[in-house]
Amino acid sequence: MDSAIKIAFATTDMNTVNQHFGSSKSFAVYAVDPDRSELLEAAQFGDLAQDGNEDKLSVKMQMLEGCAAVYCQAVGASAIKQLVAHGIQPVKVHEGSRIVDLIADLQNELKSGSSSWLAKAINKAKGFDPSRFDAMEEEGWSE
């Protein structure tokens, strides 16, 4: 799955998104491309309270390294800032949203045209293209 993006889901049952980001006990991390998805890992964190303790987020940020997005029921402002700084898009969904349905929606979006955060994630997964401005230069563009 060369063109796949990594997506995390805050879940305790591996079937539904049923956790707040900060107090999430576990994440299911999938590789998703337009046609397939694959569970990469299930990370466990144990019991974490929604207590405003920022230190507990660092472990989650490390675990989410390389993910384009994390789906959760809710996420605090400080966590949003940290996620965005790590290039991870927080996506808030309704309690009980089924992971298979969210993946199907994401795959449909990959096929039909991506939202701004998804387009960024796809470009990041493709890597830096050193020739991306060549056509503009040939047309006579200048700074």
Image (cartoon, rainbow, N blue to C red):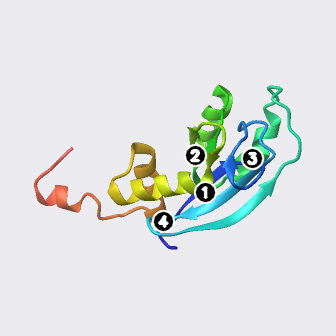
Image quarter for residue 93? top right
Q: What residue would you read off at disc 4?
A: 33
Dot 3 or dot 4, earlier in sequence: 4
Looking at the image, which is closer to me, 95 or 80?
A: 95
Label 3: how many residues lie within 10 Å, few (<14), some (14-19) or many (20+)? some
Look at label 2 and name its amino acid: Ile
Label 2: how many residues lie within 10 Å, few (<14), some (14-19) or many (20+)? many
Residue lying at the far bottom in this picture: please name it.
1
Looking at the image, which is closer to me, 64 or 134?
A: 64
Distance of label 4 from label 2 (alpha carbons) = 17 Å
Query: SS at mark 4?
Result: loop
Horizontal arrangement in the rendering, residue 136 relative to residue 19 (left or right): left
Task: Say above or below: 135 vs 57.
Answer: below
Q: What residue would you read off at disc 2?
A: 88
Distance of label 1 from label 4 (alpha carbons) = 15 Å
Q: What residue would you read off at disc 3?
A: 60
